[in-house]
C-alpha cells in the first residue's frame, strides 16, 4: 500500500483561504492603481500633442467619482475653465478636430493615451497581483508611473 505525504497541505489550504478572503480588497487596489495610470497617460498624451494653452483642460483630467462598489472608473477632463468652456468639450475637439473658420486638425490624442495606458495598466496590475500572491498581503496603491508593478513608459 502506498502512502501519500500531505505535510504542508493544511498550511497551503489555509493560505488559499486567506487569499480568497482578500480578493475584494486586492481588486479595489488594482482598480484604483489602473485608473491613476490611465489618468497619467491622458495627461502625458495631451502634453505630447501640444494641447496646453491655459492648462485648464490638462489639469482637469481626473478619475470621476464612481458609484460605491462600481468596478469601473471613468477618466476624462472635468469641469469648466474660467470662461465657462467645458474641459471635456475641449478634449473632444482636440481629439476629433473641427472644420470651419477656426479649423483644428484631429490629433487622436486620446487614442494614443488609451493605447499607452493599456500597456502600462496591464504591467501594473500583473505586478500588484504577483505581489499579492507572493506575500498574501493586499498591496498599497502605488503612484502612477511608480516602479511598483514593474511600470516603465513604453516608446511609440
Image (spheres, rainbow, N blue to C red):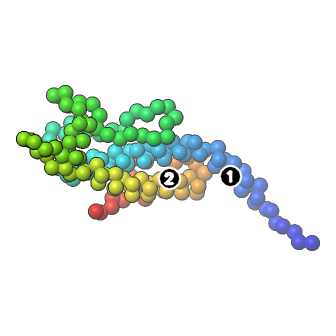
Q: Is residue 7 visible?
A: yes
The mark found on residue 47 in the picture is none
Q: Is residue 129 above or below residue 82?
A: below
Closest to the observer: 82 or 103?
Answer: 103
Residue 139 at what x, y percent from top left? 52, 48
Q: How many marks?
A: 2
Q: Is residue 47 visible?
A: no
Give the alpha-carbon distance from disc 2 to disc 1, as whole Å. Answer: 17 Å
Q: Which quarter of the rendering shows the C terminus? A: bottom left
The mark found on residue 16 in the picture is 1
Closest to the observer: 89 or 46?
Answer: 89
Sort mark 2 into few (<14), some (14-19) or many (20+) by Cα contacts within 10 Å: many
Q: Residue furthest right?
A: 1
Q: Residue furthest bottom?
A: 1
Residue linked to disc 2: 128
Q: Is residue 63 left or right of residue 141?
A: left
Res 62 → quadrant: top left
Q: Residue furthest left?
A: 101
Q: Is residue 134 left or right of residue 9?
A: left
Amino acid at each position: 500500500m502506498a502512502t501519500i505525504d500531505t505535510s504542508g497541505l493544511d498550511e497551503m489550504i489555509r493560505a488559499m483561504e486567506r487569499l480568497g478572503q482578500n480578493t475584494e480588497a486586492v481588486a479595489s487596489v488594482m482598480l484604483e492603481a489602473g485608473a491613476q495610470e490611465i489618468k497619467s497617460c491622458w495627461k502625458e498624451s495631451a502634453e505630447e500633442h501640444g494641447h496646453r494653452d491655459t492648462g485648464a483642460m490638462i489639469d482637469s483630467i481626473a478619475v470621476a467619482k464612481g458609484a460605491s462598489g462600481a468596478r469601473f472608473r471613468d477618466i476624462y477632463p472635468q469641469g469648466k475653465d474660467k470662461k465657462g468652456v467645458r474641459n471635456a468639450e475641449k478634449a473632444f475637439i482636440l481629439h476629433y478636430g473641427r472644420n470651419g473658420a477656426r479649423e483644428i486638425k484631429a490629433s487622436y490624442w486620446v487614442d494614443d493615451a488609451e493605447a499607452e495606458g493599456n500597456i502600462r495598466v496591464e504591467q501594473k496590475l500583473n505586478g500588484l497581483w504577483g505581489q499579492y500572491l507572493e506575500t498574501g498581503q493586499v498591496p498599497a496603491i502605488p503612484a502612477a508611473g511608480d516602479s511598483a508593478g514593474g511600470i516603465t513608459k513604453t516608446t511609440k
